[in-house]
Image: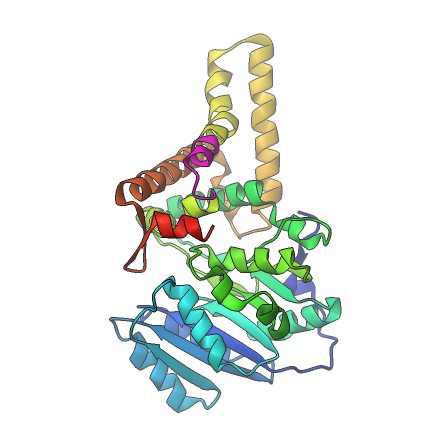
C-alpha cells in the first residue's frame, strides 16, 4: 500500500491546460445527478467540457441533464433510447459520450460522485507531472449506516487482497486497476486500446479499462482521493448485495471453481481462526491468535487508506467476512439460475459474457 499516493498531497505545478472531456453515464439517477454535476461544474480547472449521457432513463434524469445544458454551455447531452446489440448499457453510454468528446484527456465518471472544487486540477497536474496515460482515483465511500459501511469496508479489503491495486503503480507489474468513480485517460491511449468497443460486454468495465491500458504498455497510476471524491455507494446491505451481483462472477473470471476458491479462502483466513481460538488449546490456540492479529494488521494497513471510518468495523471482522461469503454465494447462485446477469434492468446471457472474457 505504500506505493499509492494521496491526491491531497499533490502540488499543482503544471502550466499546461489541456482540454478535459468529462463523460458521465447516467441511468435513473434523478436522486444524485444534480448534486454530482453541480460539484463538477464548480471545478477550479479552467478547460473542461461535459458530455452527460442519459442511458435509457425512465425517471427525470433526462430532464435534469437538459436543464444543465441550458444553464452551462460547457455541458452537452446525449440521450440514448435503445441499447445496441452486443453492448452492456454503461459501456455503450460511455462510448457514445466519447464520440461527442473533444478533449485531449477523457474523464470517465459516475453520476453520483461528489467532487471537491480542486479535484480535477490536482488530478491533471499529477498526471502531467508523472507523464501518465491513465490515472484512477479511489473515492471515500460515505456510507452512514454501520453494517453497510462495515460490509463495504470488508469488500474493499477483499478486493485489495485479491487484486492488489497498489501494484498497478509498478510499471513492470502485470497488476492493473480502474475505478469507475474517476478514470482519467489520455485520449490517444484510449483510442489505441480500442476504446470501450474492446470491453463492450464487460460488467466490470472500469477495472477492465485499466487492465487493457496496462497490458498495452501505457503508464498507469492509482491514488487515493478521500478528501476530494465522495460517494454513498450503497446505503443498505440489500442494495450492496444487489449492486454487486454484476461484478462478483465477472471478477472471478466467470468460473464457478474460482467462486468456490474465493469462498473457501475467505472462510479459512477470516472466519475459522475466530472459531478455533475458542475450541483449541496450546499451540493451536496460539496459532489462531497469531492469525487473527495478522489479519487485523493487514486489514488496518489496507482499509484505512481506502475509505474513512473503516476501522470502526474491525471488531466485527468475522461477521463482515460471512456477509462477504453470502454476497459471493448469492451472486453466483443467481447467475447460475438465471443463466446470466441483470444489470440496470437489462439481462445479459452468461454464454455471451464468457465469449468476451
Q: Is residue 240 visible?
A: no
Query: Please, which residue is most extreme toward the left here?
Result: 58
Nearer to the camera, 198 or 308: 198
Residue 26: image quadrant is bottom left
Q: Is residue 15 left or right of residue 98?
A: right
Nearer to the camera, 311 or 18: 18
Q: Which residues are magenta?
A: 252-262
Residue 43: image quadrant is bottom right
Q: Is residue 122 visible?
A: yes
Percent x, y for residue 10?
70, 66
> Residue at horizontal 39%, vertical 84%?
68
Could you tell me how many numbered marks the image carries?
0
> Residue at horizontal 35%, vertical 46%?
241
> Residue at horizontal 52%, vertical 45%?
159
Percent x, y for residue 348?
32, 54
**With respect to residue 8, does 121 lie above or below?**
below
**With respect to residue 68, does 330 lie above or below?**
above
Nearer to the camera, 334 or 349: 349
Nearer to the camera, 237 or 265: 265
Q: What predominant SS class does the magenta segment belong to? A: helix
Residue 287: image quadrant is top right
Percent x, y for residue 180?
49, 61
Q: Is residue 260 magenta?
A: yes
Percent x, y for residue 64?
33, 80
**With respect to residue 278, does 77 lie above or below?**
below
The way the protein has been coloured in the rendering is: rainbow
Q: Is residue 109 magenta?
A: no
> Residue at horizontal 56%, vertical 74%?
106
Amino acid at each position: 500500500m505504500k506505493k499509492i499516493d494521496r491526491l491531497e498531497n499533490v502540488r499543482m505545478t503544471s502550466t499546461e491546460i489541456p482540454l478535459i472531456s468529462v463523460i458521465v453515464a447516467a441511468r435513473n439517477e434523478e436522486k444524485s445527478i444534480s448534486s454530482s454535476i453541480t460539484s463538477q461544474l464548480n471545478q477550479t480547472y479552467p478547460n473542461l467540457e461535459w458530455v452527460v449521457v442519459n442511458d435509457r432513463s425512465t425517471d427525470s434524469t433526462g430532464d435534469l441533464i437538459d436543464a444543465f445544458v441550458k444553464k452551462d454551455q460547457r455541458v452537452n447531452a446525449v440521450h440514448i433510447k435503445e441499447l445496441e446489440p452486443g453492448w452492456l448499457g454503461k459501456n455503450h453510454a460511455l462510448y457514445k459520450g466519447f464520440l461527442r468528446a473533444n478533449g485531449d484527456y477523457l474523464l470517465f465518471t459516475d453520476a453520483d460522485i461528489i467532487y471537491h472544487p480542486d479535484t480535477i486540477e490536482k488530478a491533471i497536474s499529477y498526471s502531467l507531472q508523472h507523464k501518465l496515460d491513465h490515472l484512477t482515483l479511489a473515492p471515500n465511500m460515505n456510507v452512514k449506516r454501520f453494517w453497510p459501511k462495515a460490509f463495504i469496508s470488508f469488500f474493499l479489503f477483499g478486493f485489495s487482497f485479491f487484486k492488489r491495486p497498489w501494484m498497478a503503480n509498478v510499471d513492470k507489474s502485470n497488476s492493473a486497476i480502474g475505478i469507475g468513480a474517476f478514470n482519467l485517460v489520455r485520449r490517444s491511449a484510449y483510442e489505441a486500446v480500442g476504446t470501450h468497443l474492446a470491453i463492450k460486454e464487460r460488467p466490470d468495465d472500469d477495472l477492465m479499462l485499466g487492465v487493457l491500458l496496462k497490458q498495452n504498455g501505457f503508464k498507469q497510476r492509482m491514488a487515493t482521493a478521500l478528501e476530494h471524491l465522495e460517494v454513498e455507494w450503497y446505503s443498505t446491505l440489500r442494495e450492496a448485495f444487489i449492486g454487486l451481483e454484476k461484478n462478483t462472477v465477472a471478477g472471478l473470471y466467470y468460473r464457478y471453481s474460482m467462486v468456490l476458491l474465493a469462498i473457501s479462502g475467505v472462510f479459512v483466513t477470516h472466519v475459522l481462526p475466530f472459531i478455533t481460538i475458542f475450541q483449541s488449546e496450546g499451540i493451536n490456540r496460539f496459532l489462531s491468535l497469531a492469525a487473527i492479529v495478522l489479519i487485523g494488521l493487514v486489514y488496518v494497513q489496507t482499509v484505512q487508506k481506502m475509505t474513512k471510518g473503516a476501522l470502526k468495523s474491525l471488531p466485527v471482522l468475522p461477521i463482515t467476512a460471512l456477509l462477504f461469503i453470502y454476497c459471493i454465494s448469492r451472486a453466483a447462485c443467481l447467475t447460475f439460475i438465471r443463466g446470466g446477469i441483470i444489470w440496470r434492468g437489462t439481462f445479459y446471457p452468461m454464454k455471451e459474457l464468457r465469449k468476451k472474457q
